[in-house]
Amino acid sequence: MISPDIPVLFAGFGAGLSLIIAIGAQNAFVLRQGLLREHVVPVVLLCMGSDAVLILAGISGVGAAIEAAPWILVVARWAGAAFLLAYAFTAARRVMSKSSALSTERGGSAGLWATLGTVAALTWLNPHVYLDTVLLLGSLGAAHGEARWSFGAGAAAASVIWFSLLGFGARFLAPVFARPAAWRLLDAAIAVTMVIIAAQLVFGH
């Protein structure tokens, strides 16, 4: 009973992985938290859970509702762009700061709820999440009929594996980021990435 759905499951895994692995705001934030070793488990779990909900929504046909109400994407686009620019400004300030080593021994680390709030905003205020995860994966899954749930399970599995590797695997890069200069480069890259994505949201439509 399960074997006929295995190819569909792997198809979902491949499609999900291809959409998740990209230089984006969410991935950059998860990587940074992994390097800092701060709130990694809840951050990774929130990313996984958010993807699972969005994938389920797409497979269930919620994408049709979004297409019928395009204002949802408009609101997400402008709110997301504003948040990304604010976060880019924060990252740029860290680059200019003399204390940008950002070691976990220093005080001033963001609290759990503030961190989770940032992750949630980076995830749910990104209109590409609705276009890619809900609409695209939903459409691809619908093509498999009753096996669409296997497709969704494969896409969700890709999310679990990717965010686990990104969040928990980042610690292996810790020796590189023992130097303040490395943190400045990372924060500069994050700031530039956020600005580019914000510009794409505003001017790319």
Image (cartoon, helix red, strand yellow):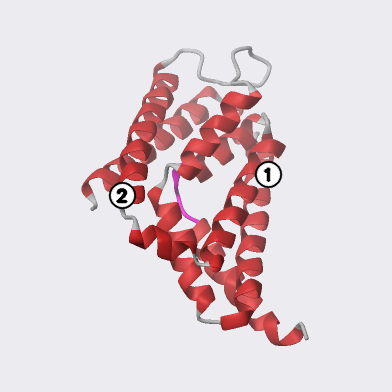
Residue placed most toward the observer, 165 or 123: 123
Horizontal and vertical percent for residue 29?
A: 53, 37
Question: Residue 197: in sight, yes or no?
Answer: no
Q: Earlier in the sequence, mark 2 or mark 1?
A: 1
| SS type, badge 2 | helix
In the rendered structure, which segment of residues is drawn in magenta?
21-25
Above or below, comparing residue 44 to residue 4 in the picture = above
Magenta span includes 23: yes
Name the residue type under label 1.
Leu
Left or right, residue 89 beside residue 137: left
Viewer-nearest residue: 141 or 162:
141
* Residue sitting nearer the eye, 61 or 200: 61
Sort mark 1 into few (<14), some (14-19) or many (20+) by Cα contacts within 10 Å: some
Q: Residues within 10 Å of mark 2 (few under 14, many from 20)?
A: few
* In this rendering, position of residue 55 left or right of residue 130: right
- 168 drawn magenta: no
Residue 129, position in %: x, y? Answer: 45, 53
Residue 90, placed above or below residue 62: above
Tell how many labels: 2
Question: Magenta part mainly helix, strand or loop?
Answer: loop
Which amino acid lies under the numbered mark 2 shown in the image of this protein? Answer: Trp
Number of the front mark, 2 or 1: 2
Q: Is residue 55 left or right of residue 201?
A: right
Please name the residue that numbered disc 2 is placed on. 71
Residue for point 65% across, 82% down: 7
Disc 1: which residue: 45
